[in-house]
Image (tube, rainbow, N blue to C red):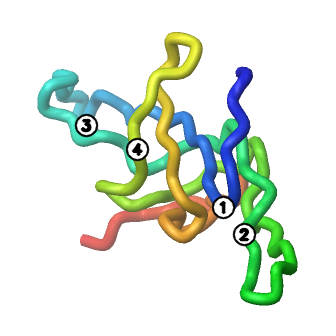
Amino acid sequence: MKFRPLHDRVVVRRIDAEGRTKGGIIIPDTAQEKPQEGEVVAAGPGRHDEQGKLIPLDVKVGDRVLFGKWSGTEVKIDGEDLLIVKESDIMGVVEAAATFKKAA
């Protein structure tokens, strides 16, 4: 990819959710919500504080992150649909060993 985000912006590739329920029902693409999880493809250098000191980002290329449903700007780069978000729109990094269960 030949795109470098500026400041505290991050380029994210959405990770598609499973198109099937636990019971085996297939959900069509038109009924699915956009995934809120993605992989960081590129990241800017960071933001500057009031004194001009560079504050590096907490995320790096390859991190799996969770972001807000309506966050960012959708773009198409090299034929791929990507999302550009500010680091502040990222809610957290998903650790590899973490397993999540929905509250009943």
In the picture as drawn, the residue positioned furthest to the right comes out as 53
| Dot placed on the residue nearer the N-terminal end, 3 or 4 | 3
Q: Marks 4/2: CA distance? A: 19 Å
Q: Marks 3/1: CA distance? A: 36 Å
- The picture quadrant where one finds residue 70 is bottom left
> Which residue was labeled with disc 3?
21
At label 3, which amino acid type do we have? Thr
- Height in image: 16 above or below 95? above
Image quadrant containing the C terminus: bottom left
- The picture quadrant where one finds residue 55 is bottom right
> Which residue was labeled with disc 1?
8
Which residue is rendered at x = 71% and y = 53% of the image? 96
Q: Position of residue 24 (x, y in %)?
A: 24, 29
Q: Give SS at disc 1.
A: loop
Q: Could you tell whether 80 is left or right of 22 in the image?
A: right
Label 4 Cα crowd, 10 Å radius (few <14 / some 14-19 / many 20+): few
> Which residue was labeled with disc 2?
47
